[in-house]
Image (cartoon, helix red, strand yellow):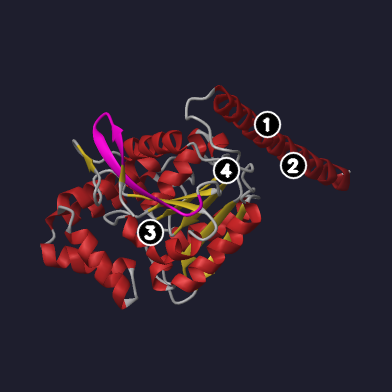
Amino acid sequence: MTARTLDRPDATVSYWVEGPRHAATVLLLHGAALDHHAWRPQVRVLRDRYRVVTVDLRHHGASTASGAFRFHDAVDDVLALLDALAPEPVALVGLSLGGNIAQEVVRRDPERVDALVVADATCNSVVRLPTEKMASLAALRSLAWYPRRLFLHAAVRATARDRDARRYVREATAAMPQSAAVGVLSSLVSDALRAEPGYRLPVPTLLVHGDGDRVGDIAVGARRWARRDPRVELVVIPSASHLSNLDAPEAFTGALVDFLDRVVPAPTPSEPAEPPDGPFRRLRAAARAWWARRRHALARVRTRTSRAARRARRTSARG
């Protein structure tokens, strides 16, 4: 398997594609200071039934970028990658930072995504006290002054329990300058998190976190998130920390596959090959795009109708 590249105005993003060409696409987004290798256990299983795409986010792994890491630039990269891949249907799976990026992709362009998995990541839209954000940023920025050895030790202890997972975290994090890693985390807190209490996810969503995840408000927030959002399911992975997909890969992958098999629609049957720029290919692409928009519009109508019915029942009960 060789890396493909996506050229961006200020970056070159590397990505990898495995699995059946005409299957539904699963795009996997890794966490801060890691790379696409974080998904190895899941790729080995998913590639038998899905078109699996892994990516190194800008400033991570084999990808490069100029200037500092900016959260919204990474979101733009993922949207551009979806444009290049033209997947139909598609599920976004994000871990930690990748989960925050996946949420923002869905918020910006919900019709592009059929299902969402947010693993060991905080909710972008929950209301937080201003002092919480300020305290988090101050704590993160102080990490830039840690001795290198202590910084790597803290990163490993905070993210993984499994010995092999810890080794991978240390190697991946050590490959990134300490100031760059701190910058990634700071951009996440300052740019991704926004108060939007009325927002509800428009696609079926699976929340996953390790039962020992002590990073931020992830564990507590996931329970509140699942209660408030009707399209959200929650799975807690036993014997796992922040990198639940590596601490307990079998349990994580089992929950992931069960969810994807239930909610990701089957792709349109493939047709005989034709030239890439053929007129029938363009017509089919337009028809698929129209049907995707129509399907999501119908889903939103059903959701509104269901909510209206629940309100009517509550009103009738009070009367």
Q: Which residue is mark 4?
A: 89
Amino acid type for the residue under numbered disc 2: Arg
Q: Which residue is mark 1?
A: 294
Q: Is residue 195 visible?
A: no
Q: In the shown orientation, is residue 22 left or right of residue 318? A: left
Q: Is residue 15 magenta?
A: yes
Amino acid type for the residue under numbered disc 1: Arg
Given residues 269 and 42, the one toward you in this image is 269
Q: CA distance from mark 4 to mark 1?
A: 13 Å
Viewer-side label of 4, 1: 4
Q: Give the residue drawn at x 61%, y 38%.
A: 271
Q: Which residue is mark 2?
A: 307
Instruction: Give how far across and how far down residue 233 sits, in percent.
Output: 60, 58
Q: Quadrant of the N terminus?
A: bottom left
Local crowd size for mark 1, using a 10 Å CA cut-off: few (<14), some (14–19), many (≥20): few
Q: CA distance from mark 1 to mark 2?
A: 20 Å
Q: CA distance from mark 3 to mark 2?
A: 32 Å
Q: CA distance from mark 3 to mark 4?
A: 33 Å
Task: Identify the magenta region.
Answer: 5-20
